[in-house]
Image (cartoon, grey):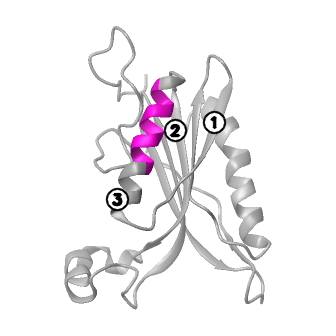
């Protein structure tokens, strides 16, 4: 596991803290992408529509266009999601076959999902969302533990533009 570079941690740390504060106020996380350029210091927030596959495809296309327009160096995504507990991950296909989705299964857990795409790869963490104290409406999550991936697939990865002189995005952090 490669640690999240300090440069990015300084940018995304406050966003993660804000996500926690939102949950602790009893609100839900709206899915957001933050498209940023380290040279200019600009970061552009993008509220994402993710209810259907068509909306997800449109959101990915919008992020890609904004990243190209602003010559982005990173994209940071925040969203609530459903995941499986570690004991059920190996049964993913069977669960999808039986229930149709993770969200429809009795094994689902609510998670805060964070993904940082850079030219050096993708850092991802999913943290279980749990009740805060004895509250029925306030929720929180623990400390993020990002994992580094150099090869990932999906509609919300490889959204950064290829810069002049690059054949493909760099995926190795030196």
Q: Quadrant of the C terminus?
A: top left
In the picture, measured across the screen, residue 70 lies left or right of residue 149, that is right
Upstream in sequence: badge 3 or badge 1: 1
- Which residue is at a point 39% across and 42% down the rendered structure image? 61
- Which residue is at a point 42% across and 31% down the rendered structure image? 160
Q: Residues within 10 Å of mark 3 (few under 14, many from 20)?
A: few
Which is closer to the viewer, label 2 or label 1? 1
Q: Nearer the viewer, residue 116 or 163?
A: 163
In the picture, measured across the screen, residue 64 lies left or right of residue 153, that is right
Circle 3 — which element? helix
Circle 1 — which element? strand
Q: Residue 38: x, y in percent?
A: 61, 22
Which is closer to the viewer, label 3 or label 2? 3
Q: Is residue 157 above or below residue 37?
A: below
Residue stretch rendered in magenta on the structure: 59-68
In the picture, measured across the screen, residue 45 lies left or right of residue 132, that is left
Q: Residue 134: x, y in percent?
A: 77, 90
Name the magenta segment's main secondary structure.
helix
Q: Residues within 10 Å of mark 2 (few under 14, many from 20)?
A: many
Q: CA distance from mark 2 to mark 1?
A: 9 Å
Q: CA distance from mark 3 to mark 1?
A: 23 Å
Of all residues, the one furthest to the top in this rendering is 165
State the mark number for residue 44.
Answer: 1
- Please state the total of marks drawn on the protein image: 3
Q: Residues within 10 Å of mark 1 (few under 14, many from 20)?
A: some
Upstream in sequence: badge 2 or badge 1: 1
Residue 66 is a magenta residue = yes
Q: Return the residue at label 2.
A: 75
Upstream in sequence: badge 3 or badge 2: 3
Q: Return the residue at label 3.
A: 54
Q: Residue 114: x, y in percent?
A: 53, 54
Circle 2 — which element? strand
């Amino acid at each position: 596991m490669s640690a999240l570079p300090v440069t990015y941690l300084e940018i995304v740390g406050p966003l993660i803290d804000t996500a926690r504060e939102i949950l602790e106020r009893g609100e839900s996380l709206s899915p957001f992408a933050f498209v940023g350029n380290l040279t200019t210091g600009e970061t552009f927030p993008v509220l994402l529509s993710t209810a259907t596959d068509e909306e997800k495809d449109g959101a990915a296309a919008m992020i890609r266009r904004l990243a190209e327009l602003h010559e982005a160096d990173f994209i940071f995504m925040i969203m609530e999601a459903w995941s499986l507990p570690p004991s059920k991950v190996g049964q993913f296909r069977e669960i999808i076959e039986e229930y149709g989705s993770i969200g429809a299964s009795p094994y689902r857990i609510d998670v805060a999902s964070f993904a940082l795409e850079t030219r050096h790869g993708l850092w991802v963490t999913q943290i279980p969302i749990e009740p805060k104290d004895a509250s029925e409406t306030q929720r929180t999550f623990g400390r993020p533990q990002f994992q580094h991936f150099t090869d990932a697939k999906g509609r919300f990865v490889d959204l950064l533009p290829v810069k002049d002189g690059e054949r493909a995005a760099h995926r190795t952090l030196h």
